Amino acid sequence: MSPSIYLGFLLLTLTLVALDIYQTRGGQITIRKAAIWSGFWFVLAFVFAATIYFFWDFYAPDSDYTAKKATVSFLTGYLLEKSLSVDNLFVFAIIFHQYTVPQHLRPRALLWGVIGALVLRAIMISVGAQLLSQFHWVMYLFAAFLIWTGIQLARDHGEDEINPLPERLIRRLLPVTESYHGNKLSIIENGKRVFTPMLVVIGVIAFMDILFALDSIPAIFAVTREPFLVLAANVFALLGLRSLYFVLEGMMNRFVYLKPALSFIMIFIGIKMALVGSAWEIPTWISLCVIMTTMTVATLASIYKEKQLPEVVNKNS
């Protein structure tokens, strides 16, 4: 993959981020608008997949991947990262609730969170690709980490607070005001530079981005070890994250089977990673089917569960 391809993709990413900033200007985002833009980002990922299929020889003329394999790998990685990123949304909701972030300031906080995630994952993809190319045994460490994370997620009964370590560090090192001042991270107060709670929120989000990257990067390396496809899948999965948040914000408590689904996906991908290079290696297309089926079943089961609740309440009353 030539540096010019990565430079072109960087410019495309910056353009799409700028578009996302423009469409959320003013801070007021309706569910209808967010749903439309969520659909736009989803369709855009499949349009990009089509360009991979038709122009893969231009993207990576020296790659061992065929155009078909590259396209399937990208779509599988994209859907995997998209499904895992849903868990981010629940954590973001907890952060906003814990720090009482005003509704009109949440788009900007989410923007910083997405940008931080993009930068951190780009770094980890670069490091991860080099590690896996030289030390195959690293795959087994990643596999064990994913399986352990999936088990921990299955055992998690939900927490009301985020780890306060980033907040403690920020407040220990910097003076922080009691109230927000718009989107500003710092202001001048009594002739001195002080920082706003928005900086604390961004710090906590950045801390969680690191933890999410530790989960998702090993997962997608089980699908493909082509760095460009890993990077592209992460970028397109994260681009629509802000819009998706506002679609799901009012429905967070309805998807009761989401965490078990994510737990299953993490364990499955961990097993797939452990089997890479063996006689029992799981094909990419099977991974794609498993991910799509799991998320579909979890969504339908959650909707059915929600419909059953009013009936149970009426019978007991």
Image (cartoon, rainbow, N blue to C red):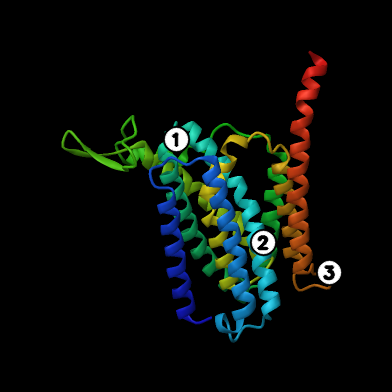
Instruction: Give the labeled residue for mark 1.
Output: 103
Q: Which amino acid, by three-letter code, is at mark 1? A: Gln
- The residue carrying mark 3 is 280
Q: Position of residue 241 (x, y in %)?
A: 54, 51
Asked if residue 271 can be seen in this view, the reply is: yes
Left or right of 236, for residue 69: right
The N terminus: image quadrant: bottom right
Foreground mark, 1 or 3?
1
For the point 73% across and 47% down, the residue is: 261
Specify whether residue 211 is in view. no
Which residue was labeled with disc 2? 141
Q: Is residue 72 above or below residue 1?
A: above
Q: Earlier in the sequence, mark 3 or mark 2?
A: 2
Residue for point 74% across, 62% down? 288
Please state, as top left, top right, bottom left or bottom right, where the C terminus lies in the image. Answer: top right
As helix, strand or loop, the secondary structure at mark 3 comes to loop
